[in-house]
Image (spheres, grey):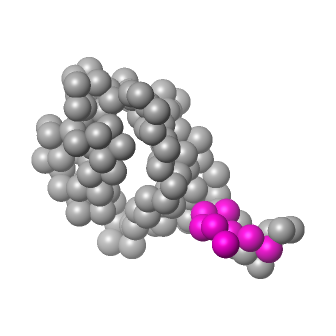
Amino acid sequence: MTNKEIVITALTELFIQRDVHAIERYWGTPYLQYNPGIPDGHDILRNIVENLGADFCYEPGLVIAENDIVMVHGRYTGWGPNPLLAVDIFRVKEGKLVEHWDVMQEEVPVASTISGRSMFTGP
């Protein structure tokens, strides 16, 4: 699998299928986290997924990969009171996700954007 395929498979199995065993298959040790509110390691990922509400939904969108870096623009619904859009950035080493950065913001409905375009989907 390519790094891009590894990341999409990992995110799909963990956040869409909610299979916590995906952590052992796709996340490396150590797993370094650069989100200031989330600690390093596997335990937090397991805890997050096991505590997701029934209304949680993850939708991957645009994926860009270059060498060992993969970026995924995704939508998280049910994570907070409003949908969140994120660019999750992963470094992949030897087939495992070993580092993660993200940039998140609340999604603004199309009707409220000046451009009239969605923040998540293209034309």
Q: Nearer the viewer, residue 89 or 109?
A: 89
Q: Can residue 41 be seen in this view?
A: no
Q: Where is residue 106 in the image (x, y as percent from the top left)?
A: 64, 58
Image quadrant occupied by the N terminus: top left
* Residue 119 shown in magenta: yes
Q: Where is residue 76 in the image (x, y as percent from the top left)?
A: 48, 60
Q: Is residue 87 visible?
A: yes
Image quadrant occupied by the C terminus: bottom right
Residue at 40% of width from left, 67% of height from top? 57
Residue at 39% of width from left, 67% of height from top? 56
* Residue 75 shown in magenta: no
Q: In this view, does 22 lie to the left or right of 93?
A: left
Residue sitting farthest toward the right: 114
Q: Where is residue 84 in the image (x, y as percent from the top left)?
A: 57, 58
Residue at 39% of width from left, 73% of height from top? 55
Q: In this view, does 83 lie to the left or right of 28?
A: right
Residue numbers of the magenta segment: 116-123
Q: Quadrant of residue 31?
A: top left
Q: Where is residue 63 in the image (x, y as percent from the top left)?
A: 47, 50
